[in-house]
Amino acid sequence: MIYWHVFLAFFIPNIIGYGGGPATIPLIEAEVVGRYGWMSSQEFAETLALGNALPSPINTKMAGYIGYEVAGLSGAVIAVLATVVPSLLLMLGALGLLYRHRDSPRVKRMSQWVRPVVALMMAWLTWSFFSEGLANAGLIHTLIIGGMAAIALLRFNAHPAFVVMAALAYGGVFLG
């Protein structure tokens, strides 16, 4: 039964999460943390941070890791397949349909609504991580990490992977 739950935990977010990784991450968190309780919000945030620091799509890395933690090697394979196969099938079908109706005003309007919805979902996820950081690390550490990350990203155009690694190192030294 655990394999079926692992499959559903990644299949459902990836089948309904139009927009790729950023759109499905809050949905995966709802399944993994909220529905099944396999991780805490903090553990999910750490998994997301590590996944962002590594190359390749975030969802497959997270699926592999979480699937492995929950159900071993078979769980990792099932989670990755549940992540990749639906997205591939939906993408091929949607691209064919959108291409066929690319001049339709409805399709153009639909495409314009995708970005704001993804932005709102990412804002919710950010707020969730921020409040979790406040609860676990405290205001001072959260502001230091957030402020330094903002400076590194906006002022020095640092690669986000390096910013995530630096935040992990800070957390390991001062919060570990």
Image (tube, grey):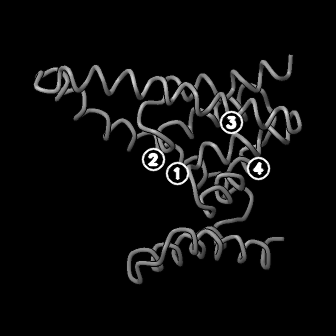
Lateral position of residue 28 relative to residue 107, left or right? right
Q: Amino acid at mark 1?
A: Thr
Alpha carbon separation for disc pair 3 and 1? 25 Å
Nearer the camera: disc 4 or disc 1: 4
Residue drawn at the location 75% of the way across and 29% of the way down: 78
Which of the two labelled residues, at mark 3 and mark 1, occupies the earlier sequence position? 3
In-front residue for pair 151/87 = 87
Residue type (three-letter) at the residue carrying disc 2: Ala
Question: SS class of the residue under badge 3?
Answer: helix
Residue wearing tag 2: 123
Residue at image position (64%, 37%) is: 29
Q: In the shown orientation, is residue 115 left or right of residue 131?
A: left
Determine which of the numbered discs, if any, sits on residue 43 in the image. Answer: 4
Q: Which part of the image, by quadrant, shows the N terminus?
A: top right
Mark 4 lies on a secondary structure that is helix
Circle 1/circle 2 CB separation < 8 Å: yes
Q: Amino acid at mark 3?
A: Val
**Residue for badge 3:** 80
Residue at the image point whose x is 68% and y is 45% from the top: 62
At label 1, counting other C-alpha atoms closer than 10 Å, the crowd grade (few under 14, some 14-19, many 20 or more) is few
Left/right of residue 95 with respect to residue 75 in the rendered view: left
Q: CA distance from mark 4 to mark 2?
A: 19 Å
Examine the rendered structure and indicate whether residue 49 appears above or below residue 119: below
Whole-Å distance between the Cαs marked 3 and 2?
Answer: 26 Å
